[in-house]
Amino acid sequence: DAVTTLTSRGIPVVTMISDIPTSPRLAYVGIDHYSAGRTAAFFMARMARRPGPVLVLCHSFDYRAHAERVSGFRDGLRDHAPDMAILEVIEGQDRQAESEALVFDRIQRAPEEICGIYNTGGANRAIDKVIGRVSWTHKPVFIGHELSIHTARMLRSNVMTLAIDQNPEEQARRAVHVLLRRFGHTETPPEPNDIPFTIFGPENIPPNEQAG
């Protein structure tokens, strides 16, 4: 409704990170979240030491980007690792303490040791703490999103296995470019609005994140 109101007043709207496709927005600039979820499932299937249950943490299904990542992960896991199953999808609202408590409780109640954790949202530090609290026979594969000083540290310490980064700086740059073209302030050719995501592991952390 807000996008419709703005658009009716002649104010163009560009969505970033999470789309609102049913709105009259000018464009969506961001990654394919479903594909990101399937990518996480592919690597989970290849990197887990054994088949077993997988735990998924997300912000909430009210957030379209998270719902698409979970959907892609579920479908990808079915295709790439039919012997691995999602134990539960936990909605932690990206609140660190709440997410930590929910994930730790579910791991404690699991009938067998989980082999992987996929976090679609921002509560990566909660997973970091949970992994440190559990006595593992085999530490789980942990795949999350976004490269930050926190996830860079987790990657270097082998707590996190992979981080799928959505290149937010590039999203912002291209969103501004869409608006510049809309108002005739640039004659440069249009760029694709689909932003490629980048997969980071411990061996390709950029120098500017090394000190995190």
Image: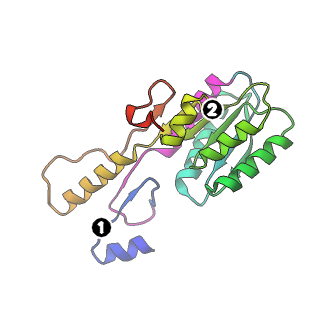
Q: Does residue 35 lie above or below 139 as drawn?
A: below
- Of 145 and 197, nearer the camera is 145
- Of 137 and 188, nearer the camera is 137
Numbered mark located on residue 30 in the image: none
- Dot 2 amino acid type: Val
Characterize the local packing of mark 1: few (<14), some (14-19) or many (20 or more) Cα atoms within 10 angstroms: some
Colour treatment of the image: rainbow
Q: Give x and y (percent) for residue 179.
A: 25, 60
* Tag 2 residue: 159
Characterize the local packing of mark 2: few (<14), some (14-19) or many (20 or more) Cα atoms within 10 angstroms: many
Q: Residue at x 71, y 50 (%)?
A: 90
For marks 2 and 1, give the one nearer the viewer. Answer: 2
Q: Is residue 46 left or right of residue 21?
A: right
Q: Does residue 45 lie above or below 126 as drawn?
A: above
- Quadrant, the N terminus: bottom left
Q: Does residue 132 lie above or below 138 as drawn?
A: below
Q: Give x and y (percent) for residue 49.
A: 70, 21
Q: Give x and y (percent) for residue 19.
A: 45, 57
Magenta segment, which residues? 22-48
Considering every residue shown, the one lying at the far front of the view is 211
* Tag 1 residue: 12
Earlier in the chain: of badge 2 and badge 1, it is 1
> Which quadrant of the view contains residue 109?
top right
- Dot 1 amino acid type: Pro
Q: Is residue 25 magenta?
A: yes
Q: Is residue 48 left or right of residue 114?
A: left
Q: Residue at x 60, y 28 (%)?
A: 158
Q: Residue at x 81, y 47 (%)?
A: 105
Q: Is residue 56 magenta?
A: no
